[in-house]
């Protein structure tokens, strides 16, 4: 029984961390129409940043400053935001797909630094030994697992609440306005480049928060944790759940993470031994298929974007429910 | 120094071949196609299949043209692979991109292209396995061109460079000397106006996919001939070909060719000062540098 509960807690913790990433992506893609091809880099910046600032010192290794968890996390989040700011400022005023290419490049560059800069990132073997917050005070690993889950859920709820407030505010309407029609938004005095940059940086910092929680959860980070598939999983979560709907984003995260772990379990249990080497590729094909089929069949996702009442009265006349090209 | 330069030129030729089609597709269909580089892998594997088939059916073809490791079977297989890859590019467009184009915006296409890339790459893993493969197990001896500074060149490399340049020249002639080439450039320039002048857009889109697929297949085979074939071949070329299109300016074929060489040579030279593990990140640095100084590339125009 305890085994089952702790497994469920483990599953829910991971899904909760991923749901935070999806919420960050939803602000960028769902509300502002910004394509982030390197989710994993911003998640990784949060993870490595938190680890380097808050980890234990190791000989021959930069970092290990043993900062208190919250400060280390803040450092990781700022690192993610700084990377997003640099990429955003270079690409957001250009063709919209430049951001896609540049963010994809960030992910590739981040992975090669994580793999090669051993003095900083520990190289392929990664960094280990993160002092998990309050672990010594709680002691019991089972209780600690539940407490950690509670903390992740609290952060998820806080991020959800803050984002709901943000997107329902005039600021959120401005973001959607530039997503729908940049020229019209500009004529109303909005600065699309600045708003996009802000949305991109905030979204990336939210991904950094999730990265920091991930490191605190596993007390370990290596380039393996930053495999490109993470970016695809997060996209699948958002597309399935419904871009432009924060509830959909959270729903998608839990659904896809459930399907991912479930399919992995089923393949390892029932697939013939010769196929075991290929369970990874089969799962990757499933994720790719989910993305393509959802885009073809139901691009708005399971829970489509809902335009609030106040907004609908004016919006229905001009028909802004579909995403226009900008 | 000179060795890195020569290796860079060779990689650059392969990147250029891959970038020509990408720059046209990006310009005509107005989306960054992340599945594009998988065409290189499709081409390399298609050539592998037909190489084995032909050498099995007609053993005479299996003898290599000394001093190359290229055999008659592989040469034929490459031509067939170019057609097959072009056809797969058209098929992917029909199955996925055309449908999404009809109802959603350009960024949904970018998403879909990532999904398609993931599917293609892993289907290749399922069919051909994770491990690297070679067209020929003959050892390709390098020729010592000079001992000080040391410069080694394989005959295959010289052939690949020559063949790549020949393909590019051929495509250049088609673009500048034929009615079809004019039509293609017209569509890339202004789709609406080209249609008014009697150019059928859907035919041109199919043609661009065929050309892009064919050139990419050649690039994939050329890379595999001088290195090896793995399912991540396409993925490894994704960022370099994007960098080449951005350096050259999106929509410019000549820019893509020049950009390919610039990316190849710059990456080659950078490895003299950086550990080789950083090689995948080099195109990204080049992209950032170009965006900083000349956001529309060398030959691109400001579209806004």
Image: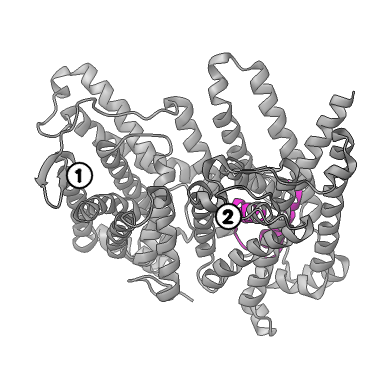
Q: From this viewpoint, is residue B187 visible?
A: yes
Determine the chain carrying the residue at label 2: A
Image quadrant containing the N terminus of chain A: top right
Give whichever of A321, A286 is nearer the camera.
A286
- State the image coordinates of residue A148 (x, y, percent, origin top left): 84, 44
- State the image coordinates of residue B34 (x, y, percent, origin top left): 48, 50
In the rendered image, which residue does mark 2 sit on?
A62
Could you classify mark 1 by the number of other residues whose Cα lies within 10 Å: few (under 14), some (14-19), or many (20 or more)? Answer: many
Could you classify mark 2 by the number of other residues whose Cα lies within 10 Å: few (under 14), some (14-19), or many (20 or more)? Answer: some
Q: Quadrant of residue B177?
A: bottom left
Foreground mark, 2 or 1?
2
Q: Quadrant of residue A221?
A: top right
- State the image coordinates of residue B242 (x, y, percent, origin top left): 41, 57
Determine the chain carrying the residue at label 1: B
Give whichever of A162, A128 is nearer the camera.
A128
Q: Is A182 above or below relative to A109?
A: below
In the rendered image, which residue does mark 1 sit on?
B160
Q: CA distance from mark 2 to mark 1?
A: 45 Å
Extent of the magenta region: A18-46
Residue at 88%, 43% (x, y): give it.
A147
Residue A75 on the magenta span = no
């Amino acid at each position: 029984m305890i085994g089952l509960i702790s497994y469920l807690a483990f599953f829910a913790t991971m899904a909760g961390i991923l749901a935070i990433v999806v919420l960050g992506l939803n602000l960028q893609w769902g509300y502002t129409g910004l394509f982030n091809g390197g989710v994993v880099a911003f998640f990784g910046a949060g993870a490595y940043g938190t680890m380097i600032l808050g980890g234990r010192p190791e000989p021959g290794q930069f970092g290990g400053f043993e900062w208190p968890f919250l400060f280390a996390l803040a450092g990781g989040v700022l690192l993610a935001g700084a990377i997003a700011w640099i990429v955003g400022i270079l690409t957001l005023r250009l063709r919209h797909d430049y951001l896609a290419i540049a963010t994809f490049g960030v992910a590739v560059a981040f992975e090669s630094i994580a793999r090669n800069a051993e003095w900083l990132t520990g190289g392929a073997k990664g960094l280990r030994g993160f002092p998990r917050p309050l672990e010594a005070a709680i002691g019991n690993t089972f209780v600690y697992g539940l407490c950690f889950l509670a903390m992740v859920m609290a952060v998820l709820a806080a991020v959800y609440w803050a984002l709901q407030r943000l997107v329902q505010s005039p600021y959120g309407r401005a973001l959607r306005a530039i997503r729908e029609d940049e020229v019209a938004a500009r004529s109303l005095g909005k600065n699309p480049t600045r708003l996009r940059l802000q949305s991109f940086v905030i979204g990336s910092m939210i991904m950094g928060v999730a990265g920091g929680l991930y490191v605190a959860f596993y007390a370990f980070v290596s380039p393996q944790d930053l495999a490109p598939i993470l970016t695809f999983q997060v996209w699948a979560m958002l597309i399935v759940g419904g871009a432009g709907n924060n509830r959909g984003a959270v729903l998608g995260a839990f659904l896809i993470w459930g399907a991912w772990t479930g399919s992995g379990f089923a393949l390892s249990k029932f697939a013939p031994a010769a196929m075991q080497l290929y369970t990874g590729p089969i799962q990757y094909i499933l994720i790719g298929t989910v993305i393509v089929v959802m885009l073809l069949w139901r691009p708005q996702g399971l829970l489509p974007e809902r335009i609030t009442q106040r907004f609908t009265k004016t919006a229905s006349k001009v028909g802004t429910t579909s995403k226009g090209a900008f | 120094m000179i060795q890195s330069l020569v290796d860079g030129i060779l990689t650059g030729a392969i990147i250029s071949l891959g970038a020509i089609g990408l720059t046209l597709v990006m310009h005509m269909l107005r989306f960054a196609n992340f599945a594009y580089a998988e065409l290189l892998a499709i081409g390399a594997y298609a050539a592998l299949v037909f190489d084995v088939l032909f050498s099995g059916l007609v053993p005479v073809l299996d003898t290599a043209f000394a001093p190359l490791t290229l055999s008659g079977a592989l040469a034929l297989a490459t031509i067939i692979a170019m057609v097959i890859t072009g056809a797969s590019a058209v098929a992917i467009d029909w199955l996925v991109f055309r449908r999404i184009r009809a109802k959603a915006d350009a960024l949904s296409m970018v998403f879909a292209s990532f999904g398609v890339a993931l599917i293609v790459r892993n289907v290749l893993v399922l069919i051909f396995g994770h491990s690297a493969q070679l067209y020929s197990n003959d050892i390709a001896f390098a020729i010592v061109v000079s001992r000080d500074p040391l410069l080694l060149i394989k005959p295959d490399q010289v052939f690949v460079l020559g063949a790549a340049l020949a393909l590019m020249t051929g495509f250049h002639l088609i673009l500048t000397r034929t009615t079809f080439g004019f039509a293609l450039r017209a569509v890339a320039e202004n789709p609406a106006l080209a249609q008014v002048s009697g150019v059928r857009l859907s035919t041109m889109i199919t043609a661009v996919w065929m050309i892009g697929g064919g050139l990419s297949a050649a690039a994939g085979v050329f890379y595999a001939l001088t290195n090896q074939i793995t399912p991540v071949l396409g993925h490894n070329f994704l960022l370099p070909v994007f960098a080449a299109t951005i350096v050259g300016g999106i929509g410019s074929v000549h820019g893509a060719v020049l950009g390919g060489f610039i990316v190849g040579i710059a990456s080659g030279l950078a490895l003299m000062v950086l550990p080789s593990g950083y090689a995948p990140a080099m195109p990204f640095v080049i992209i950032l540098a170009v965006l900083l100084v000349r956001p529309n590339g060398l030959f691109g125009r400001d579209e806004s």
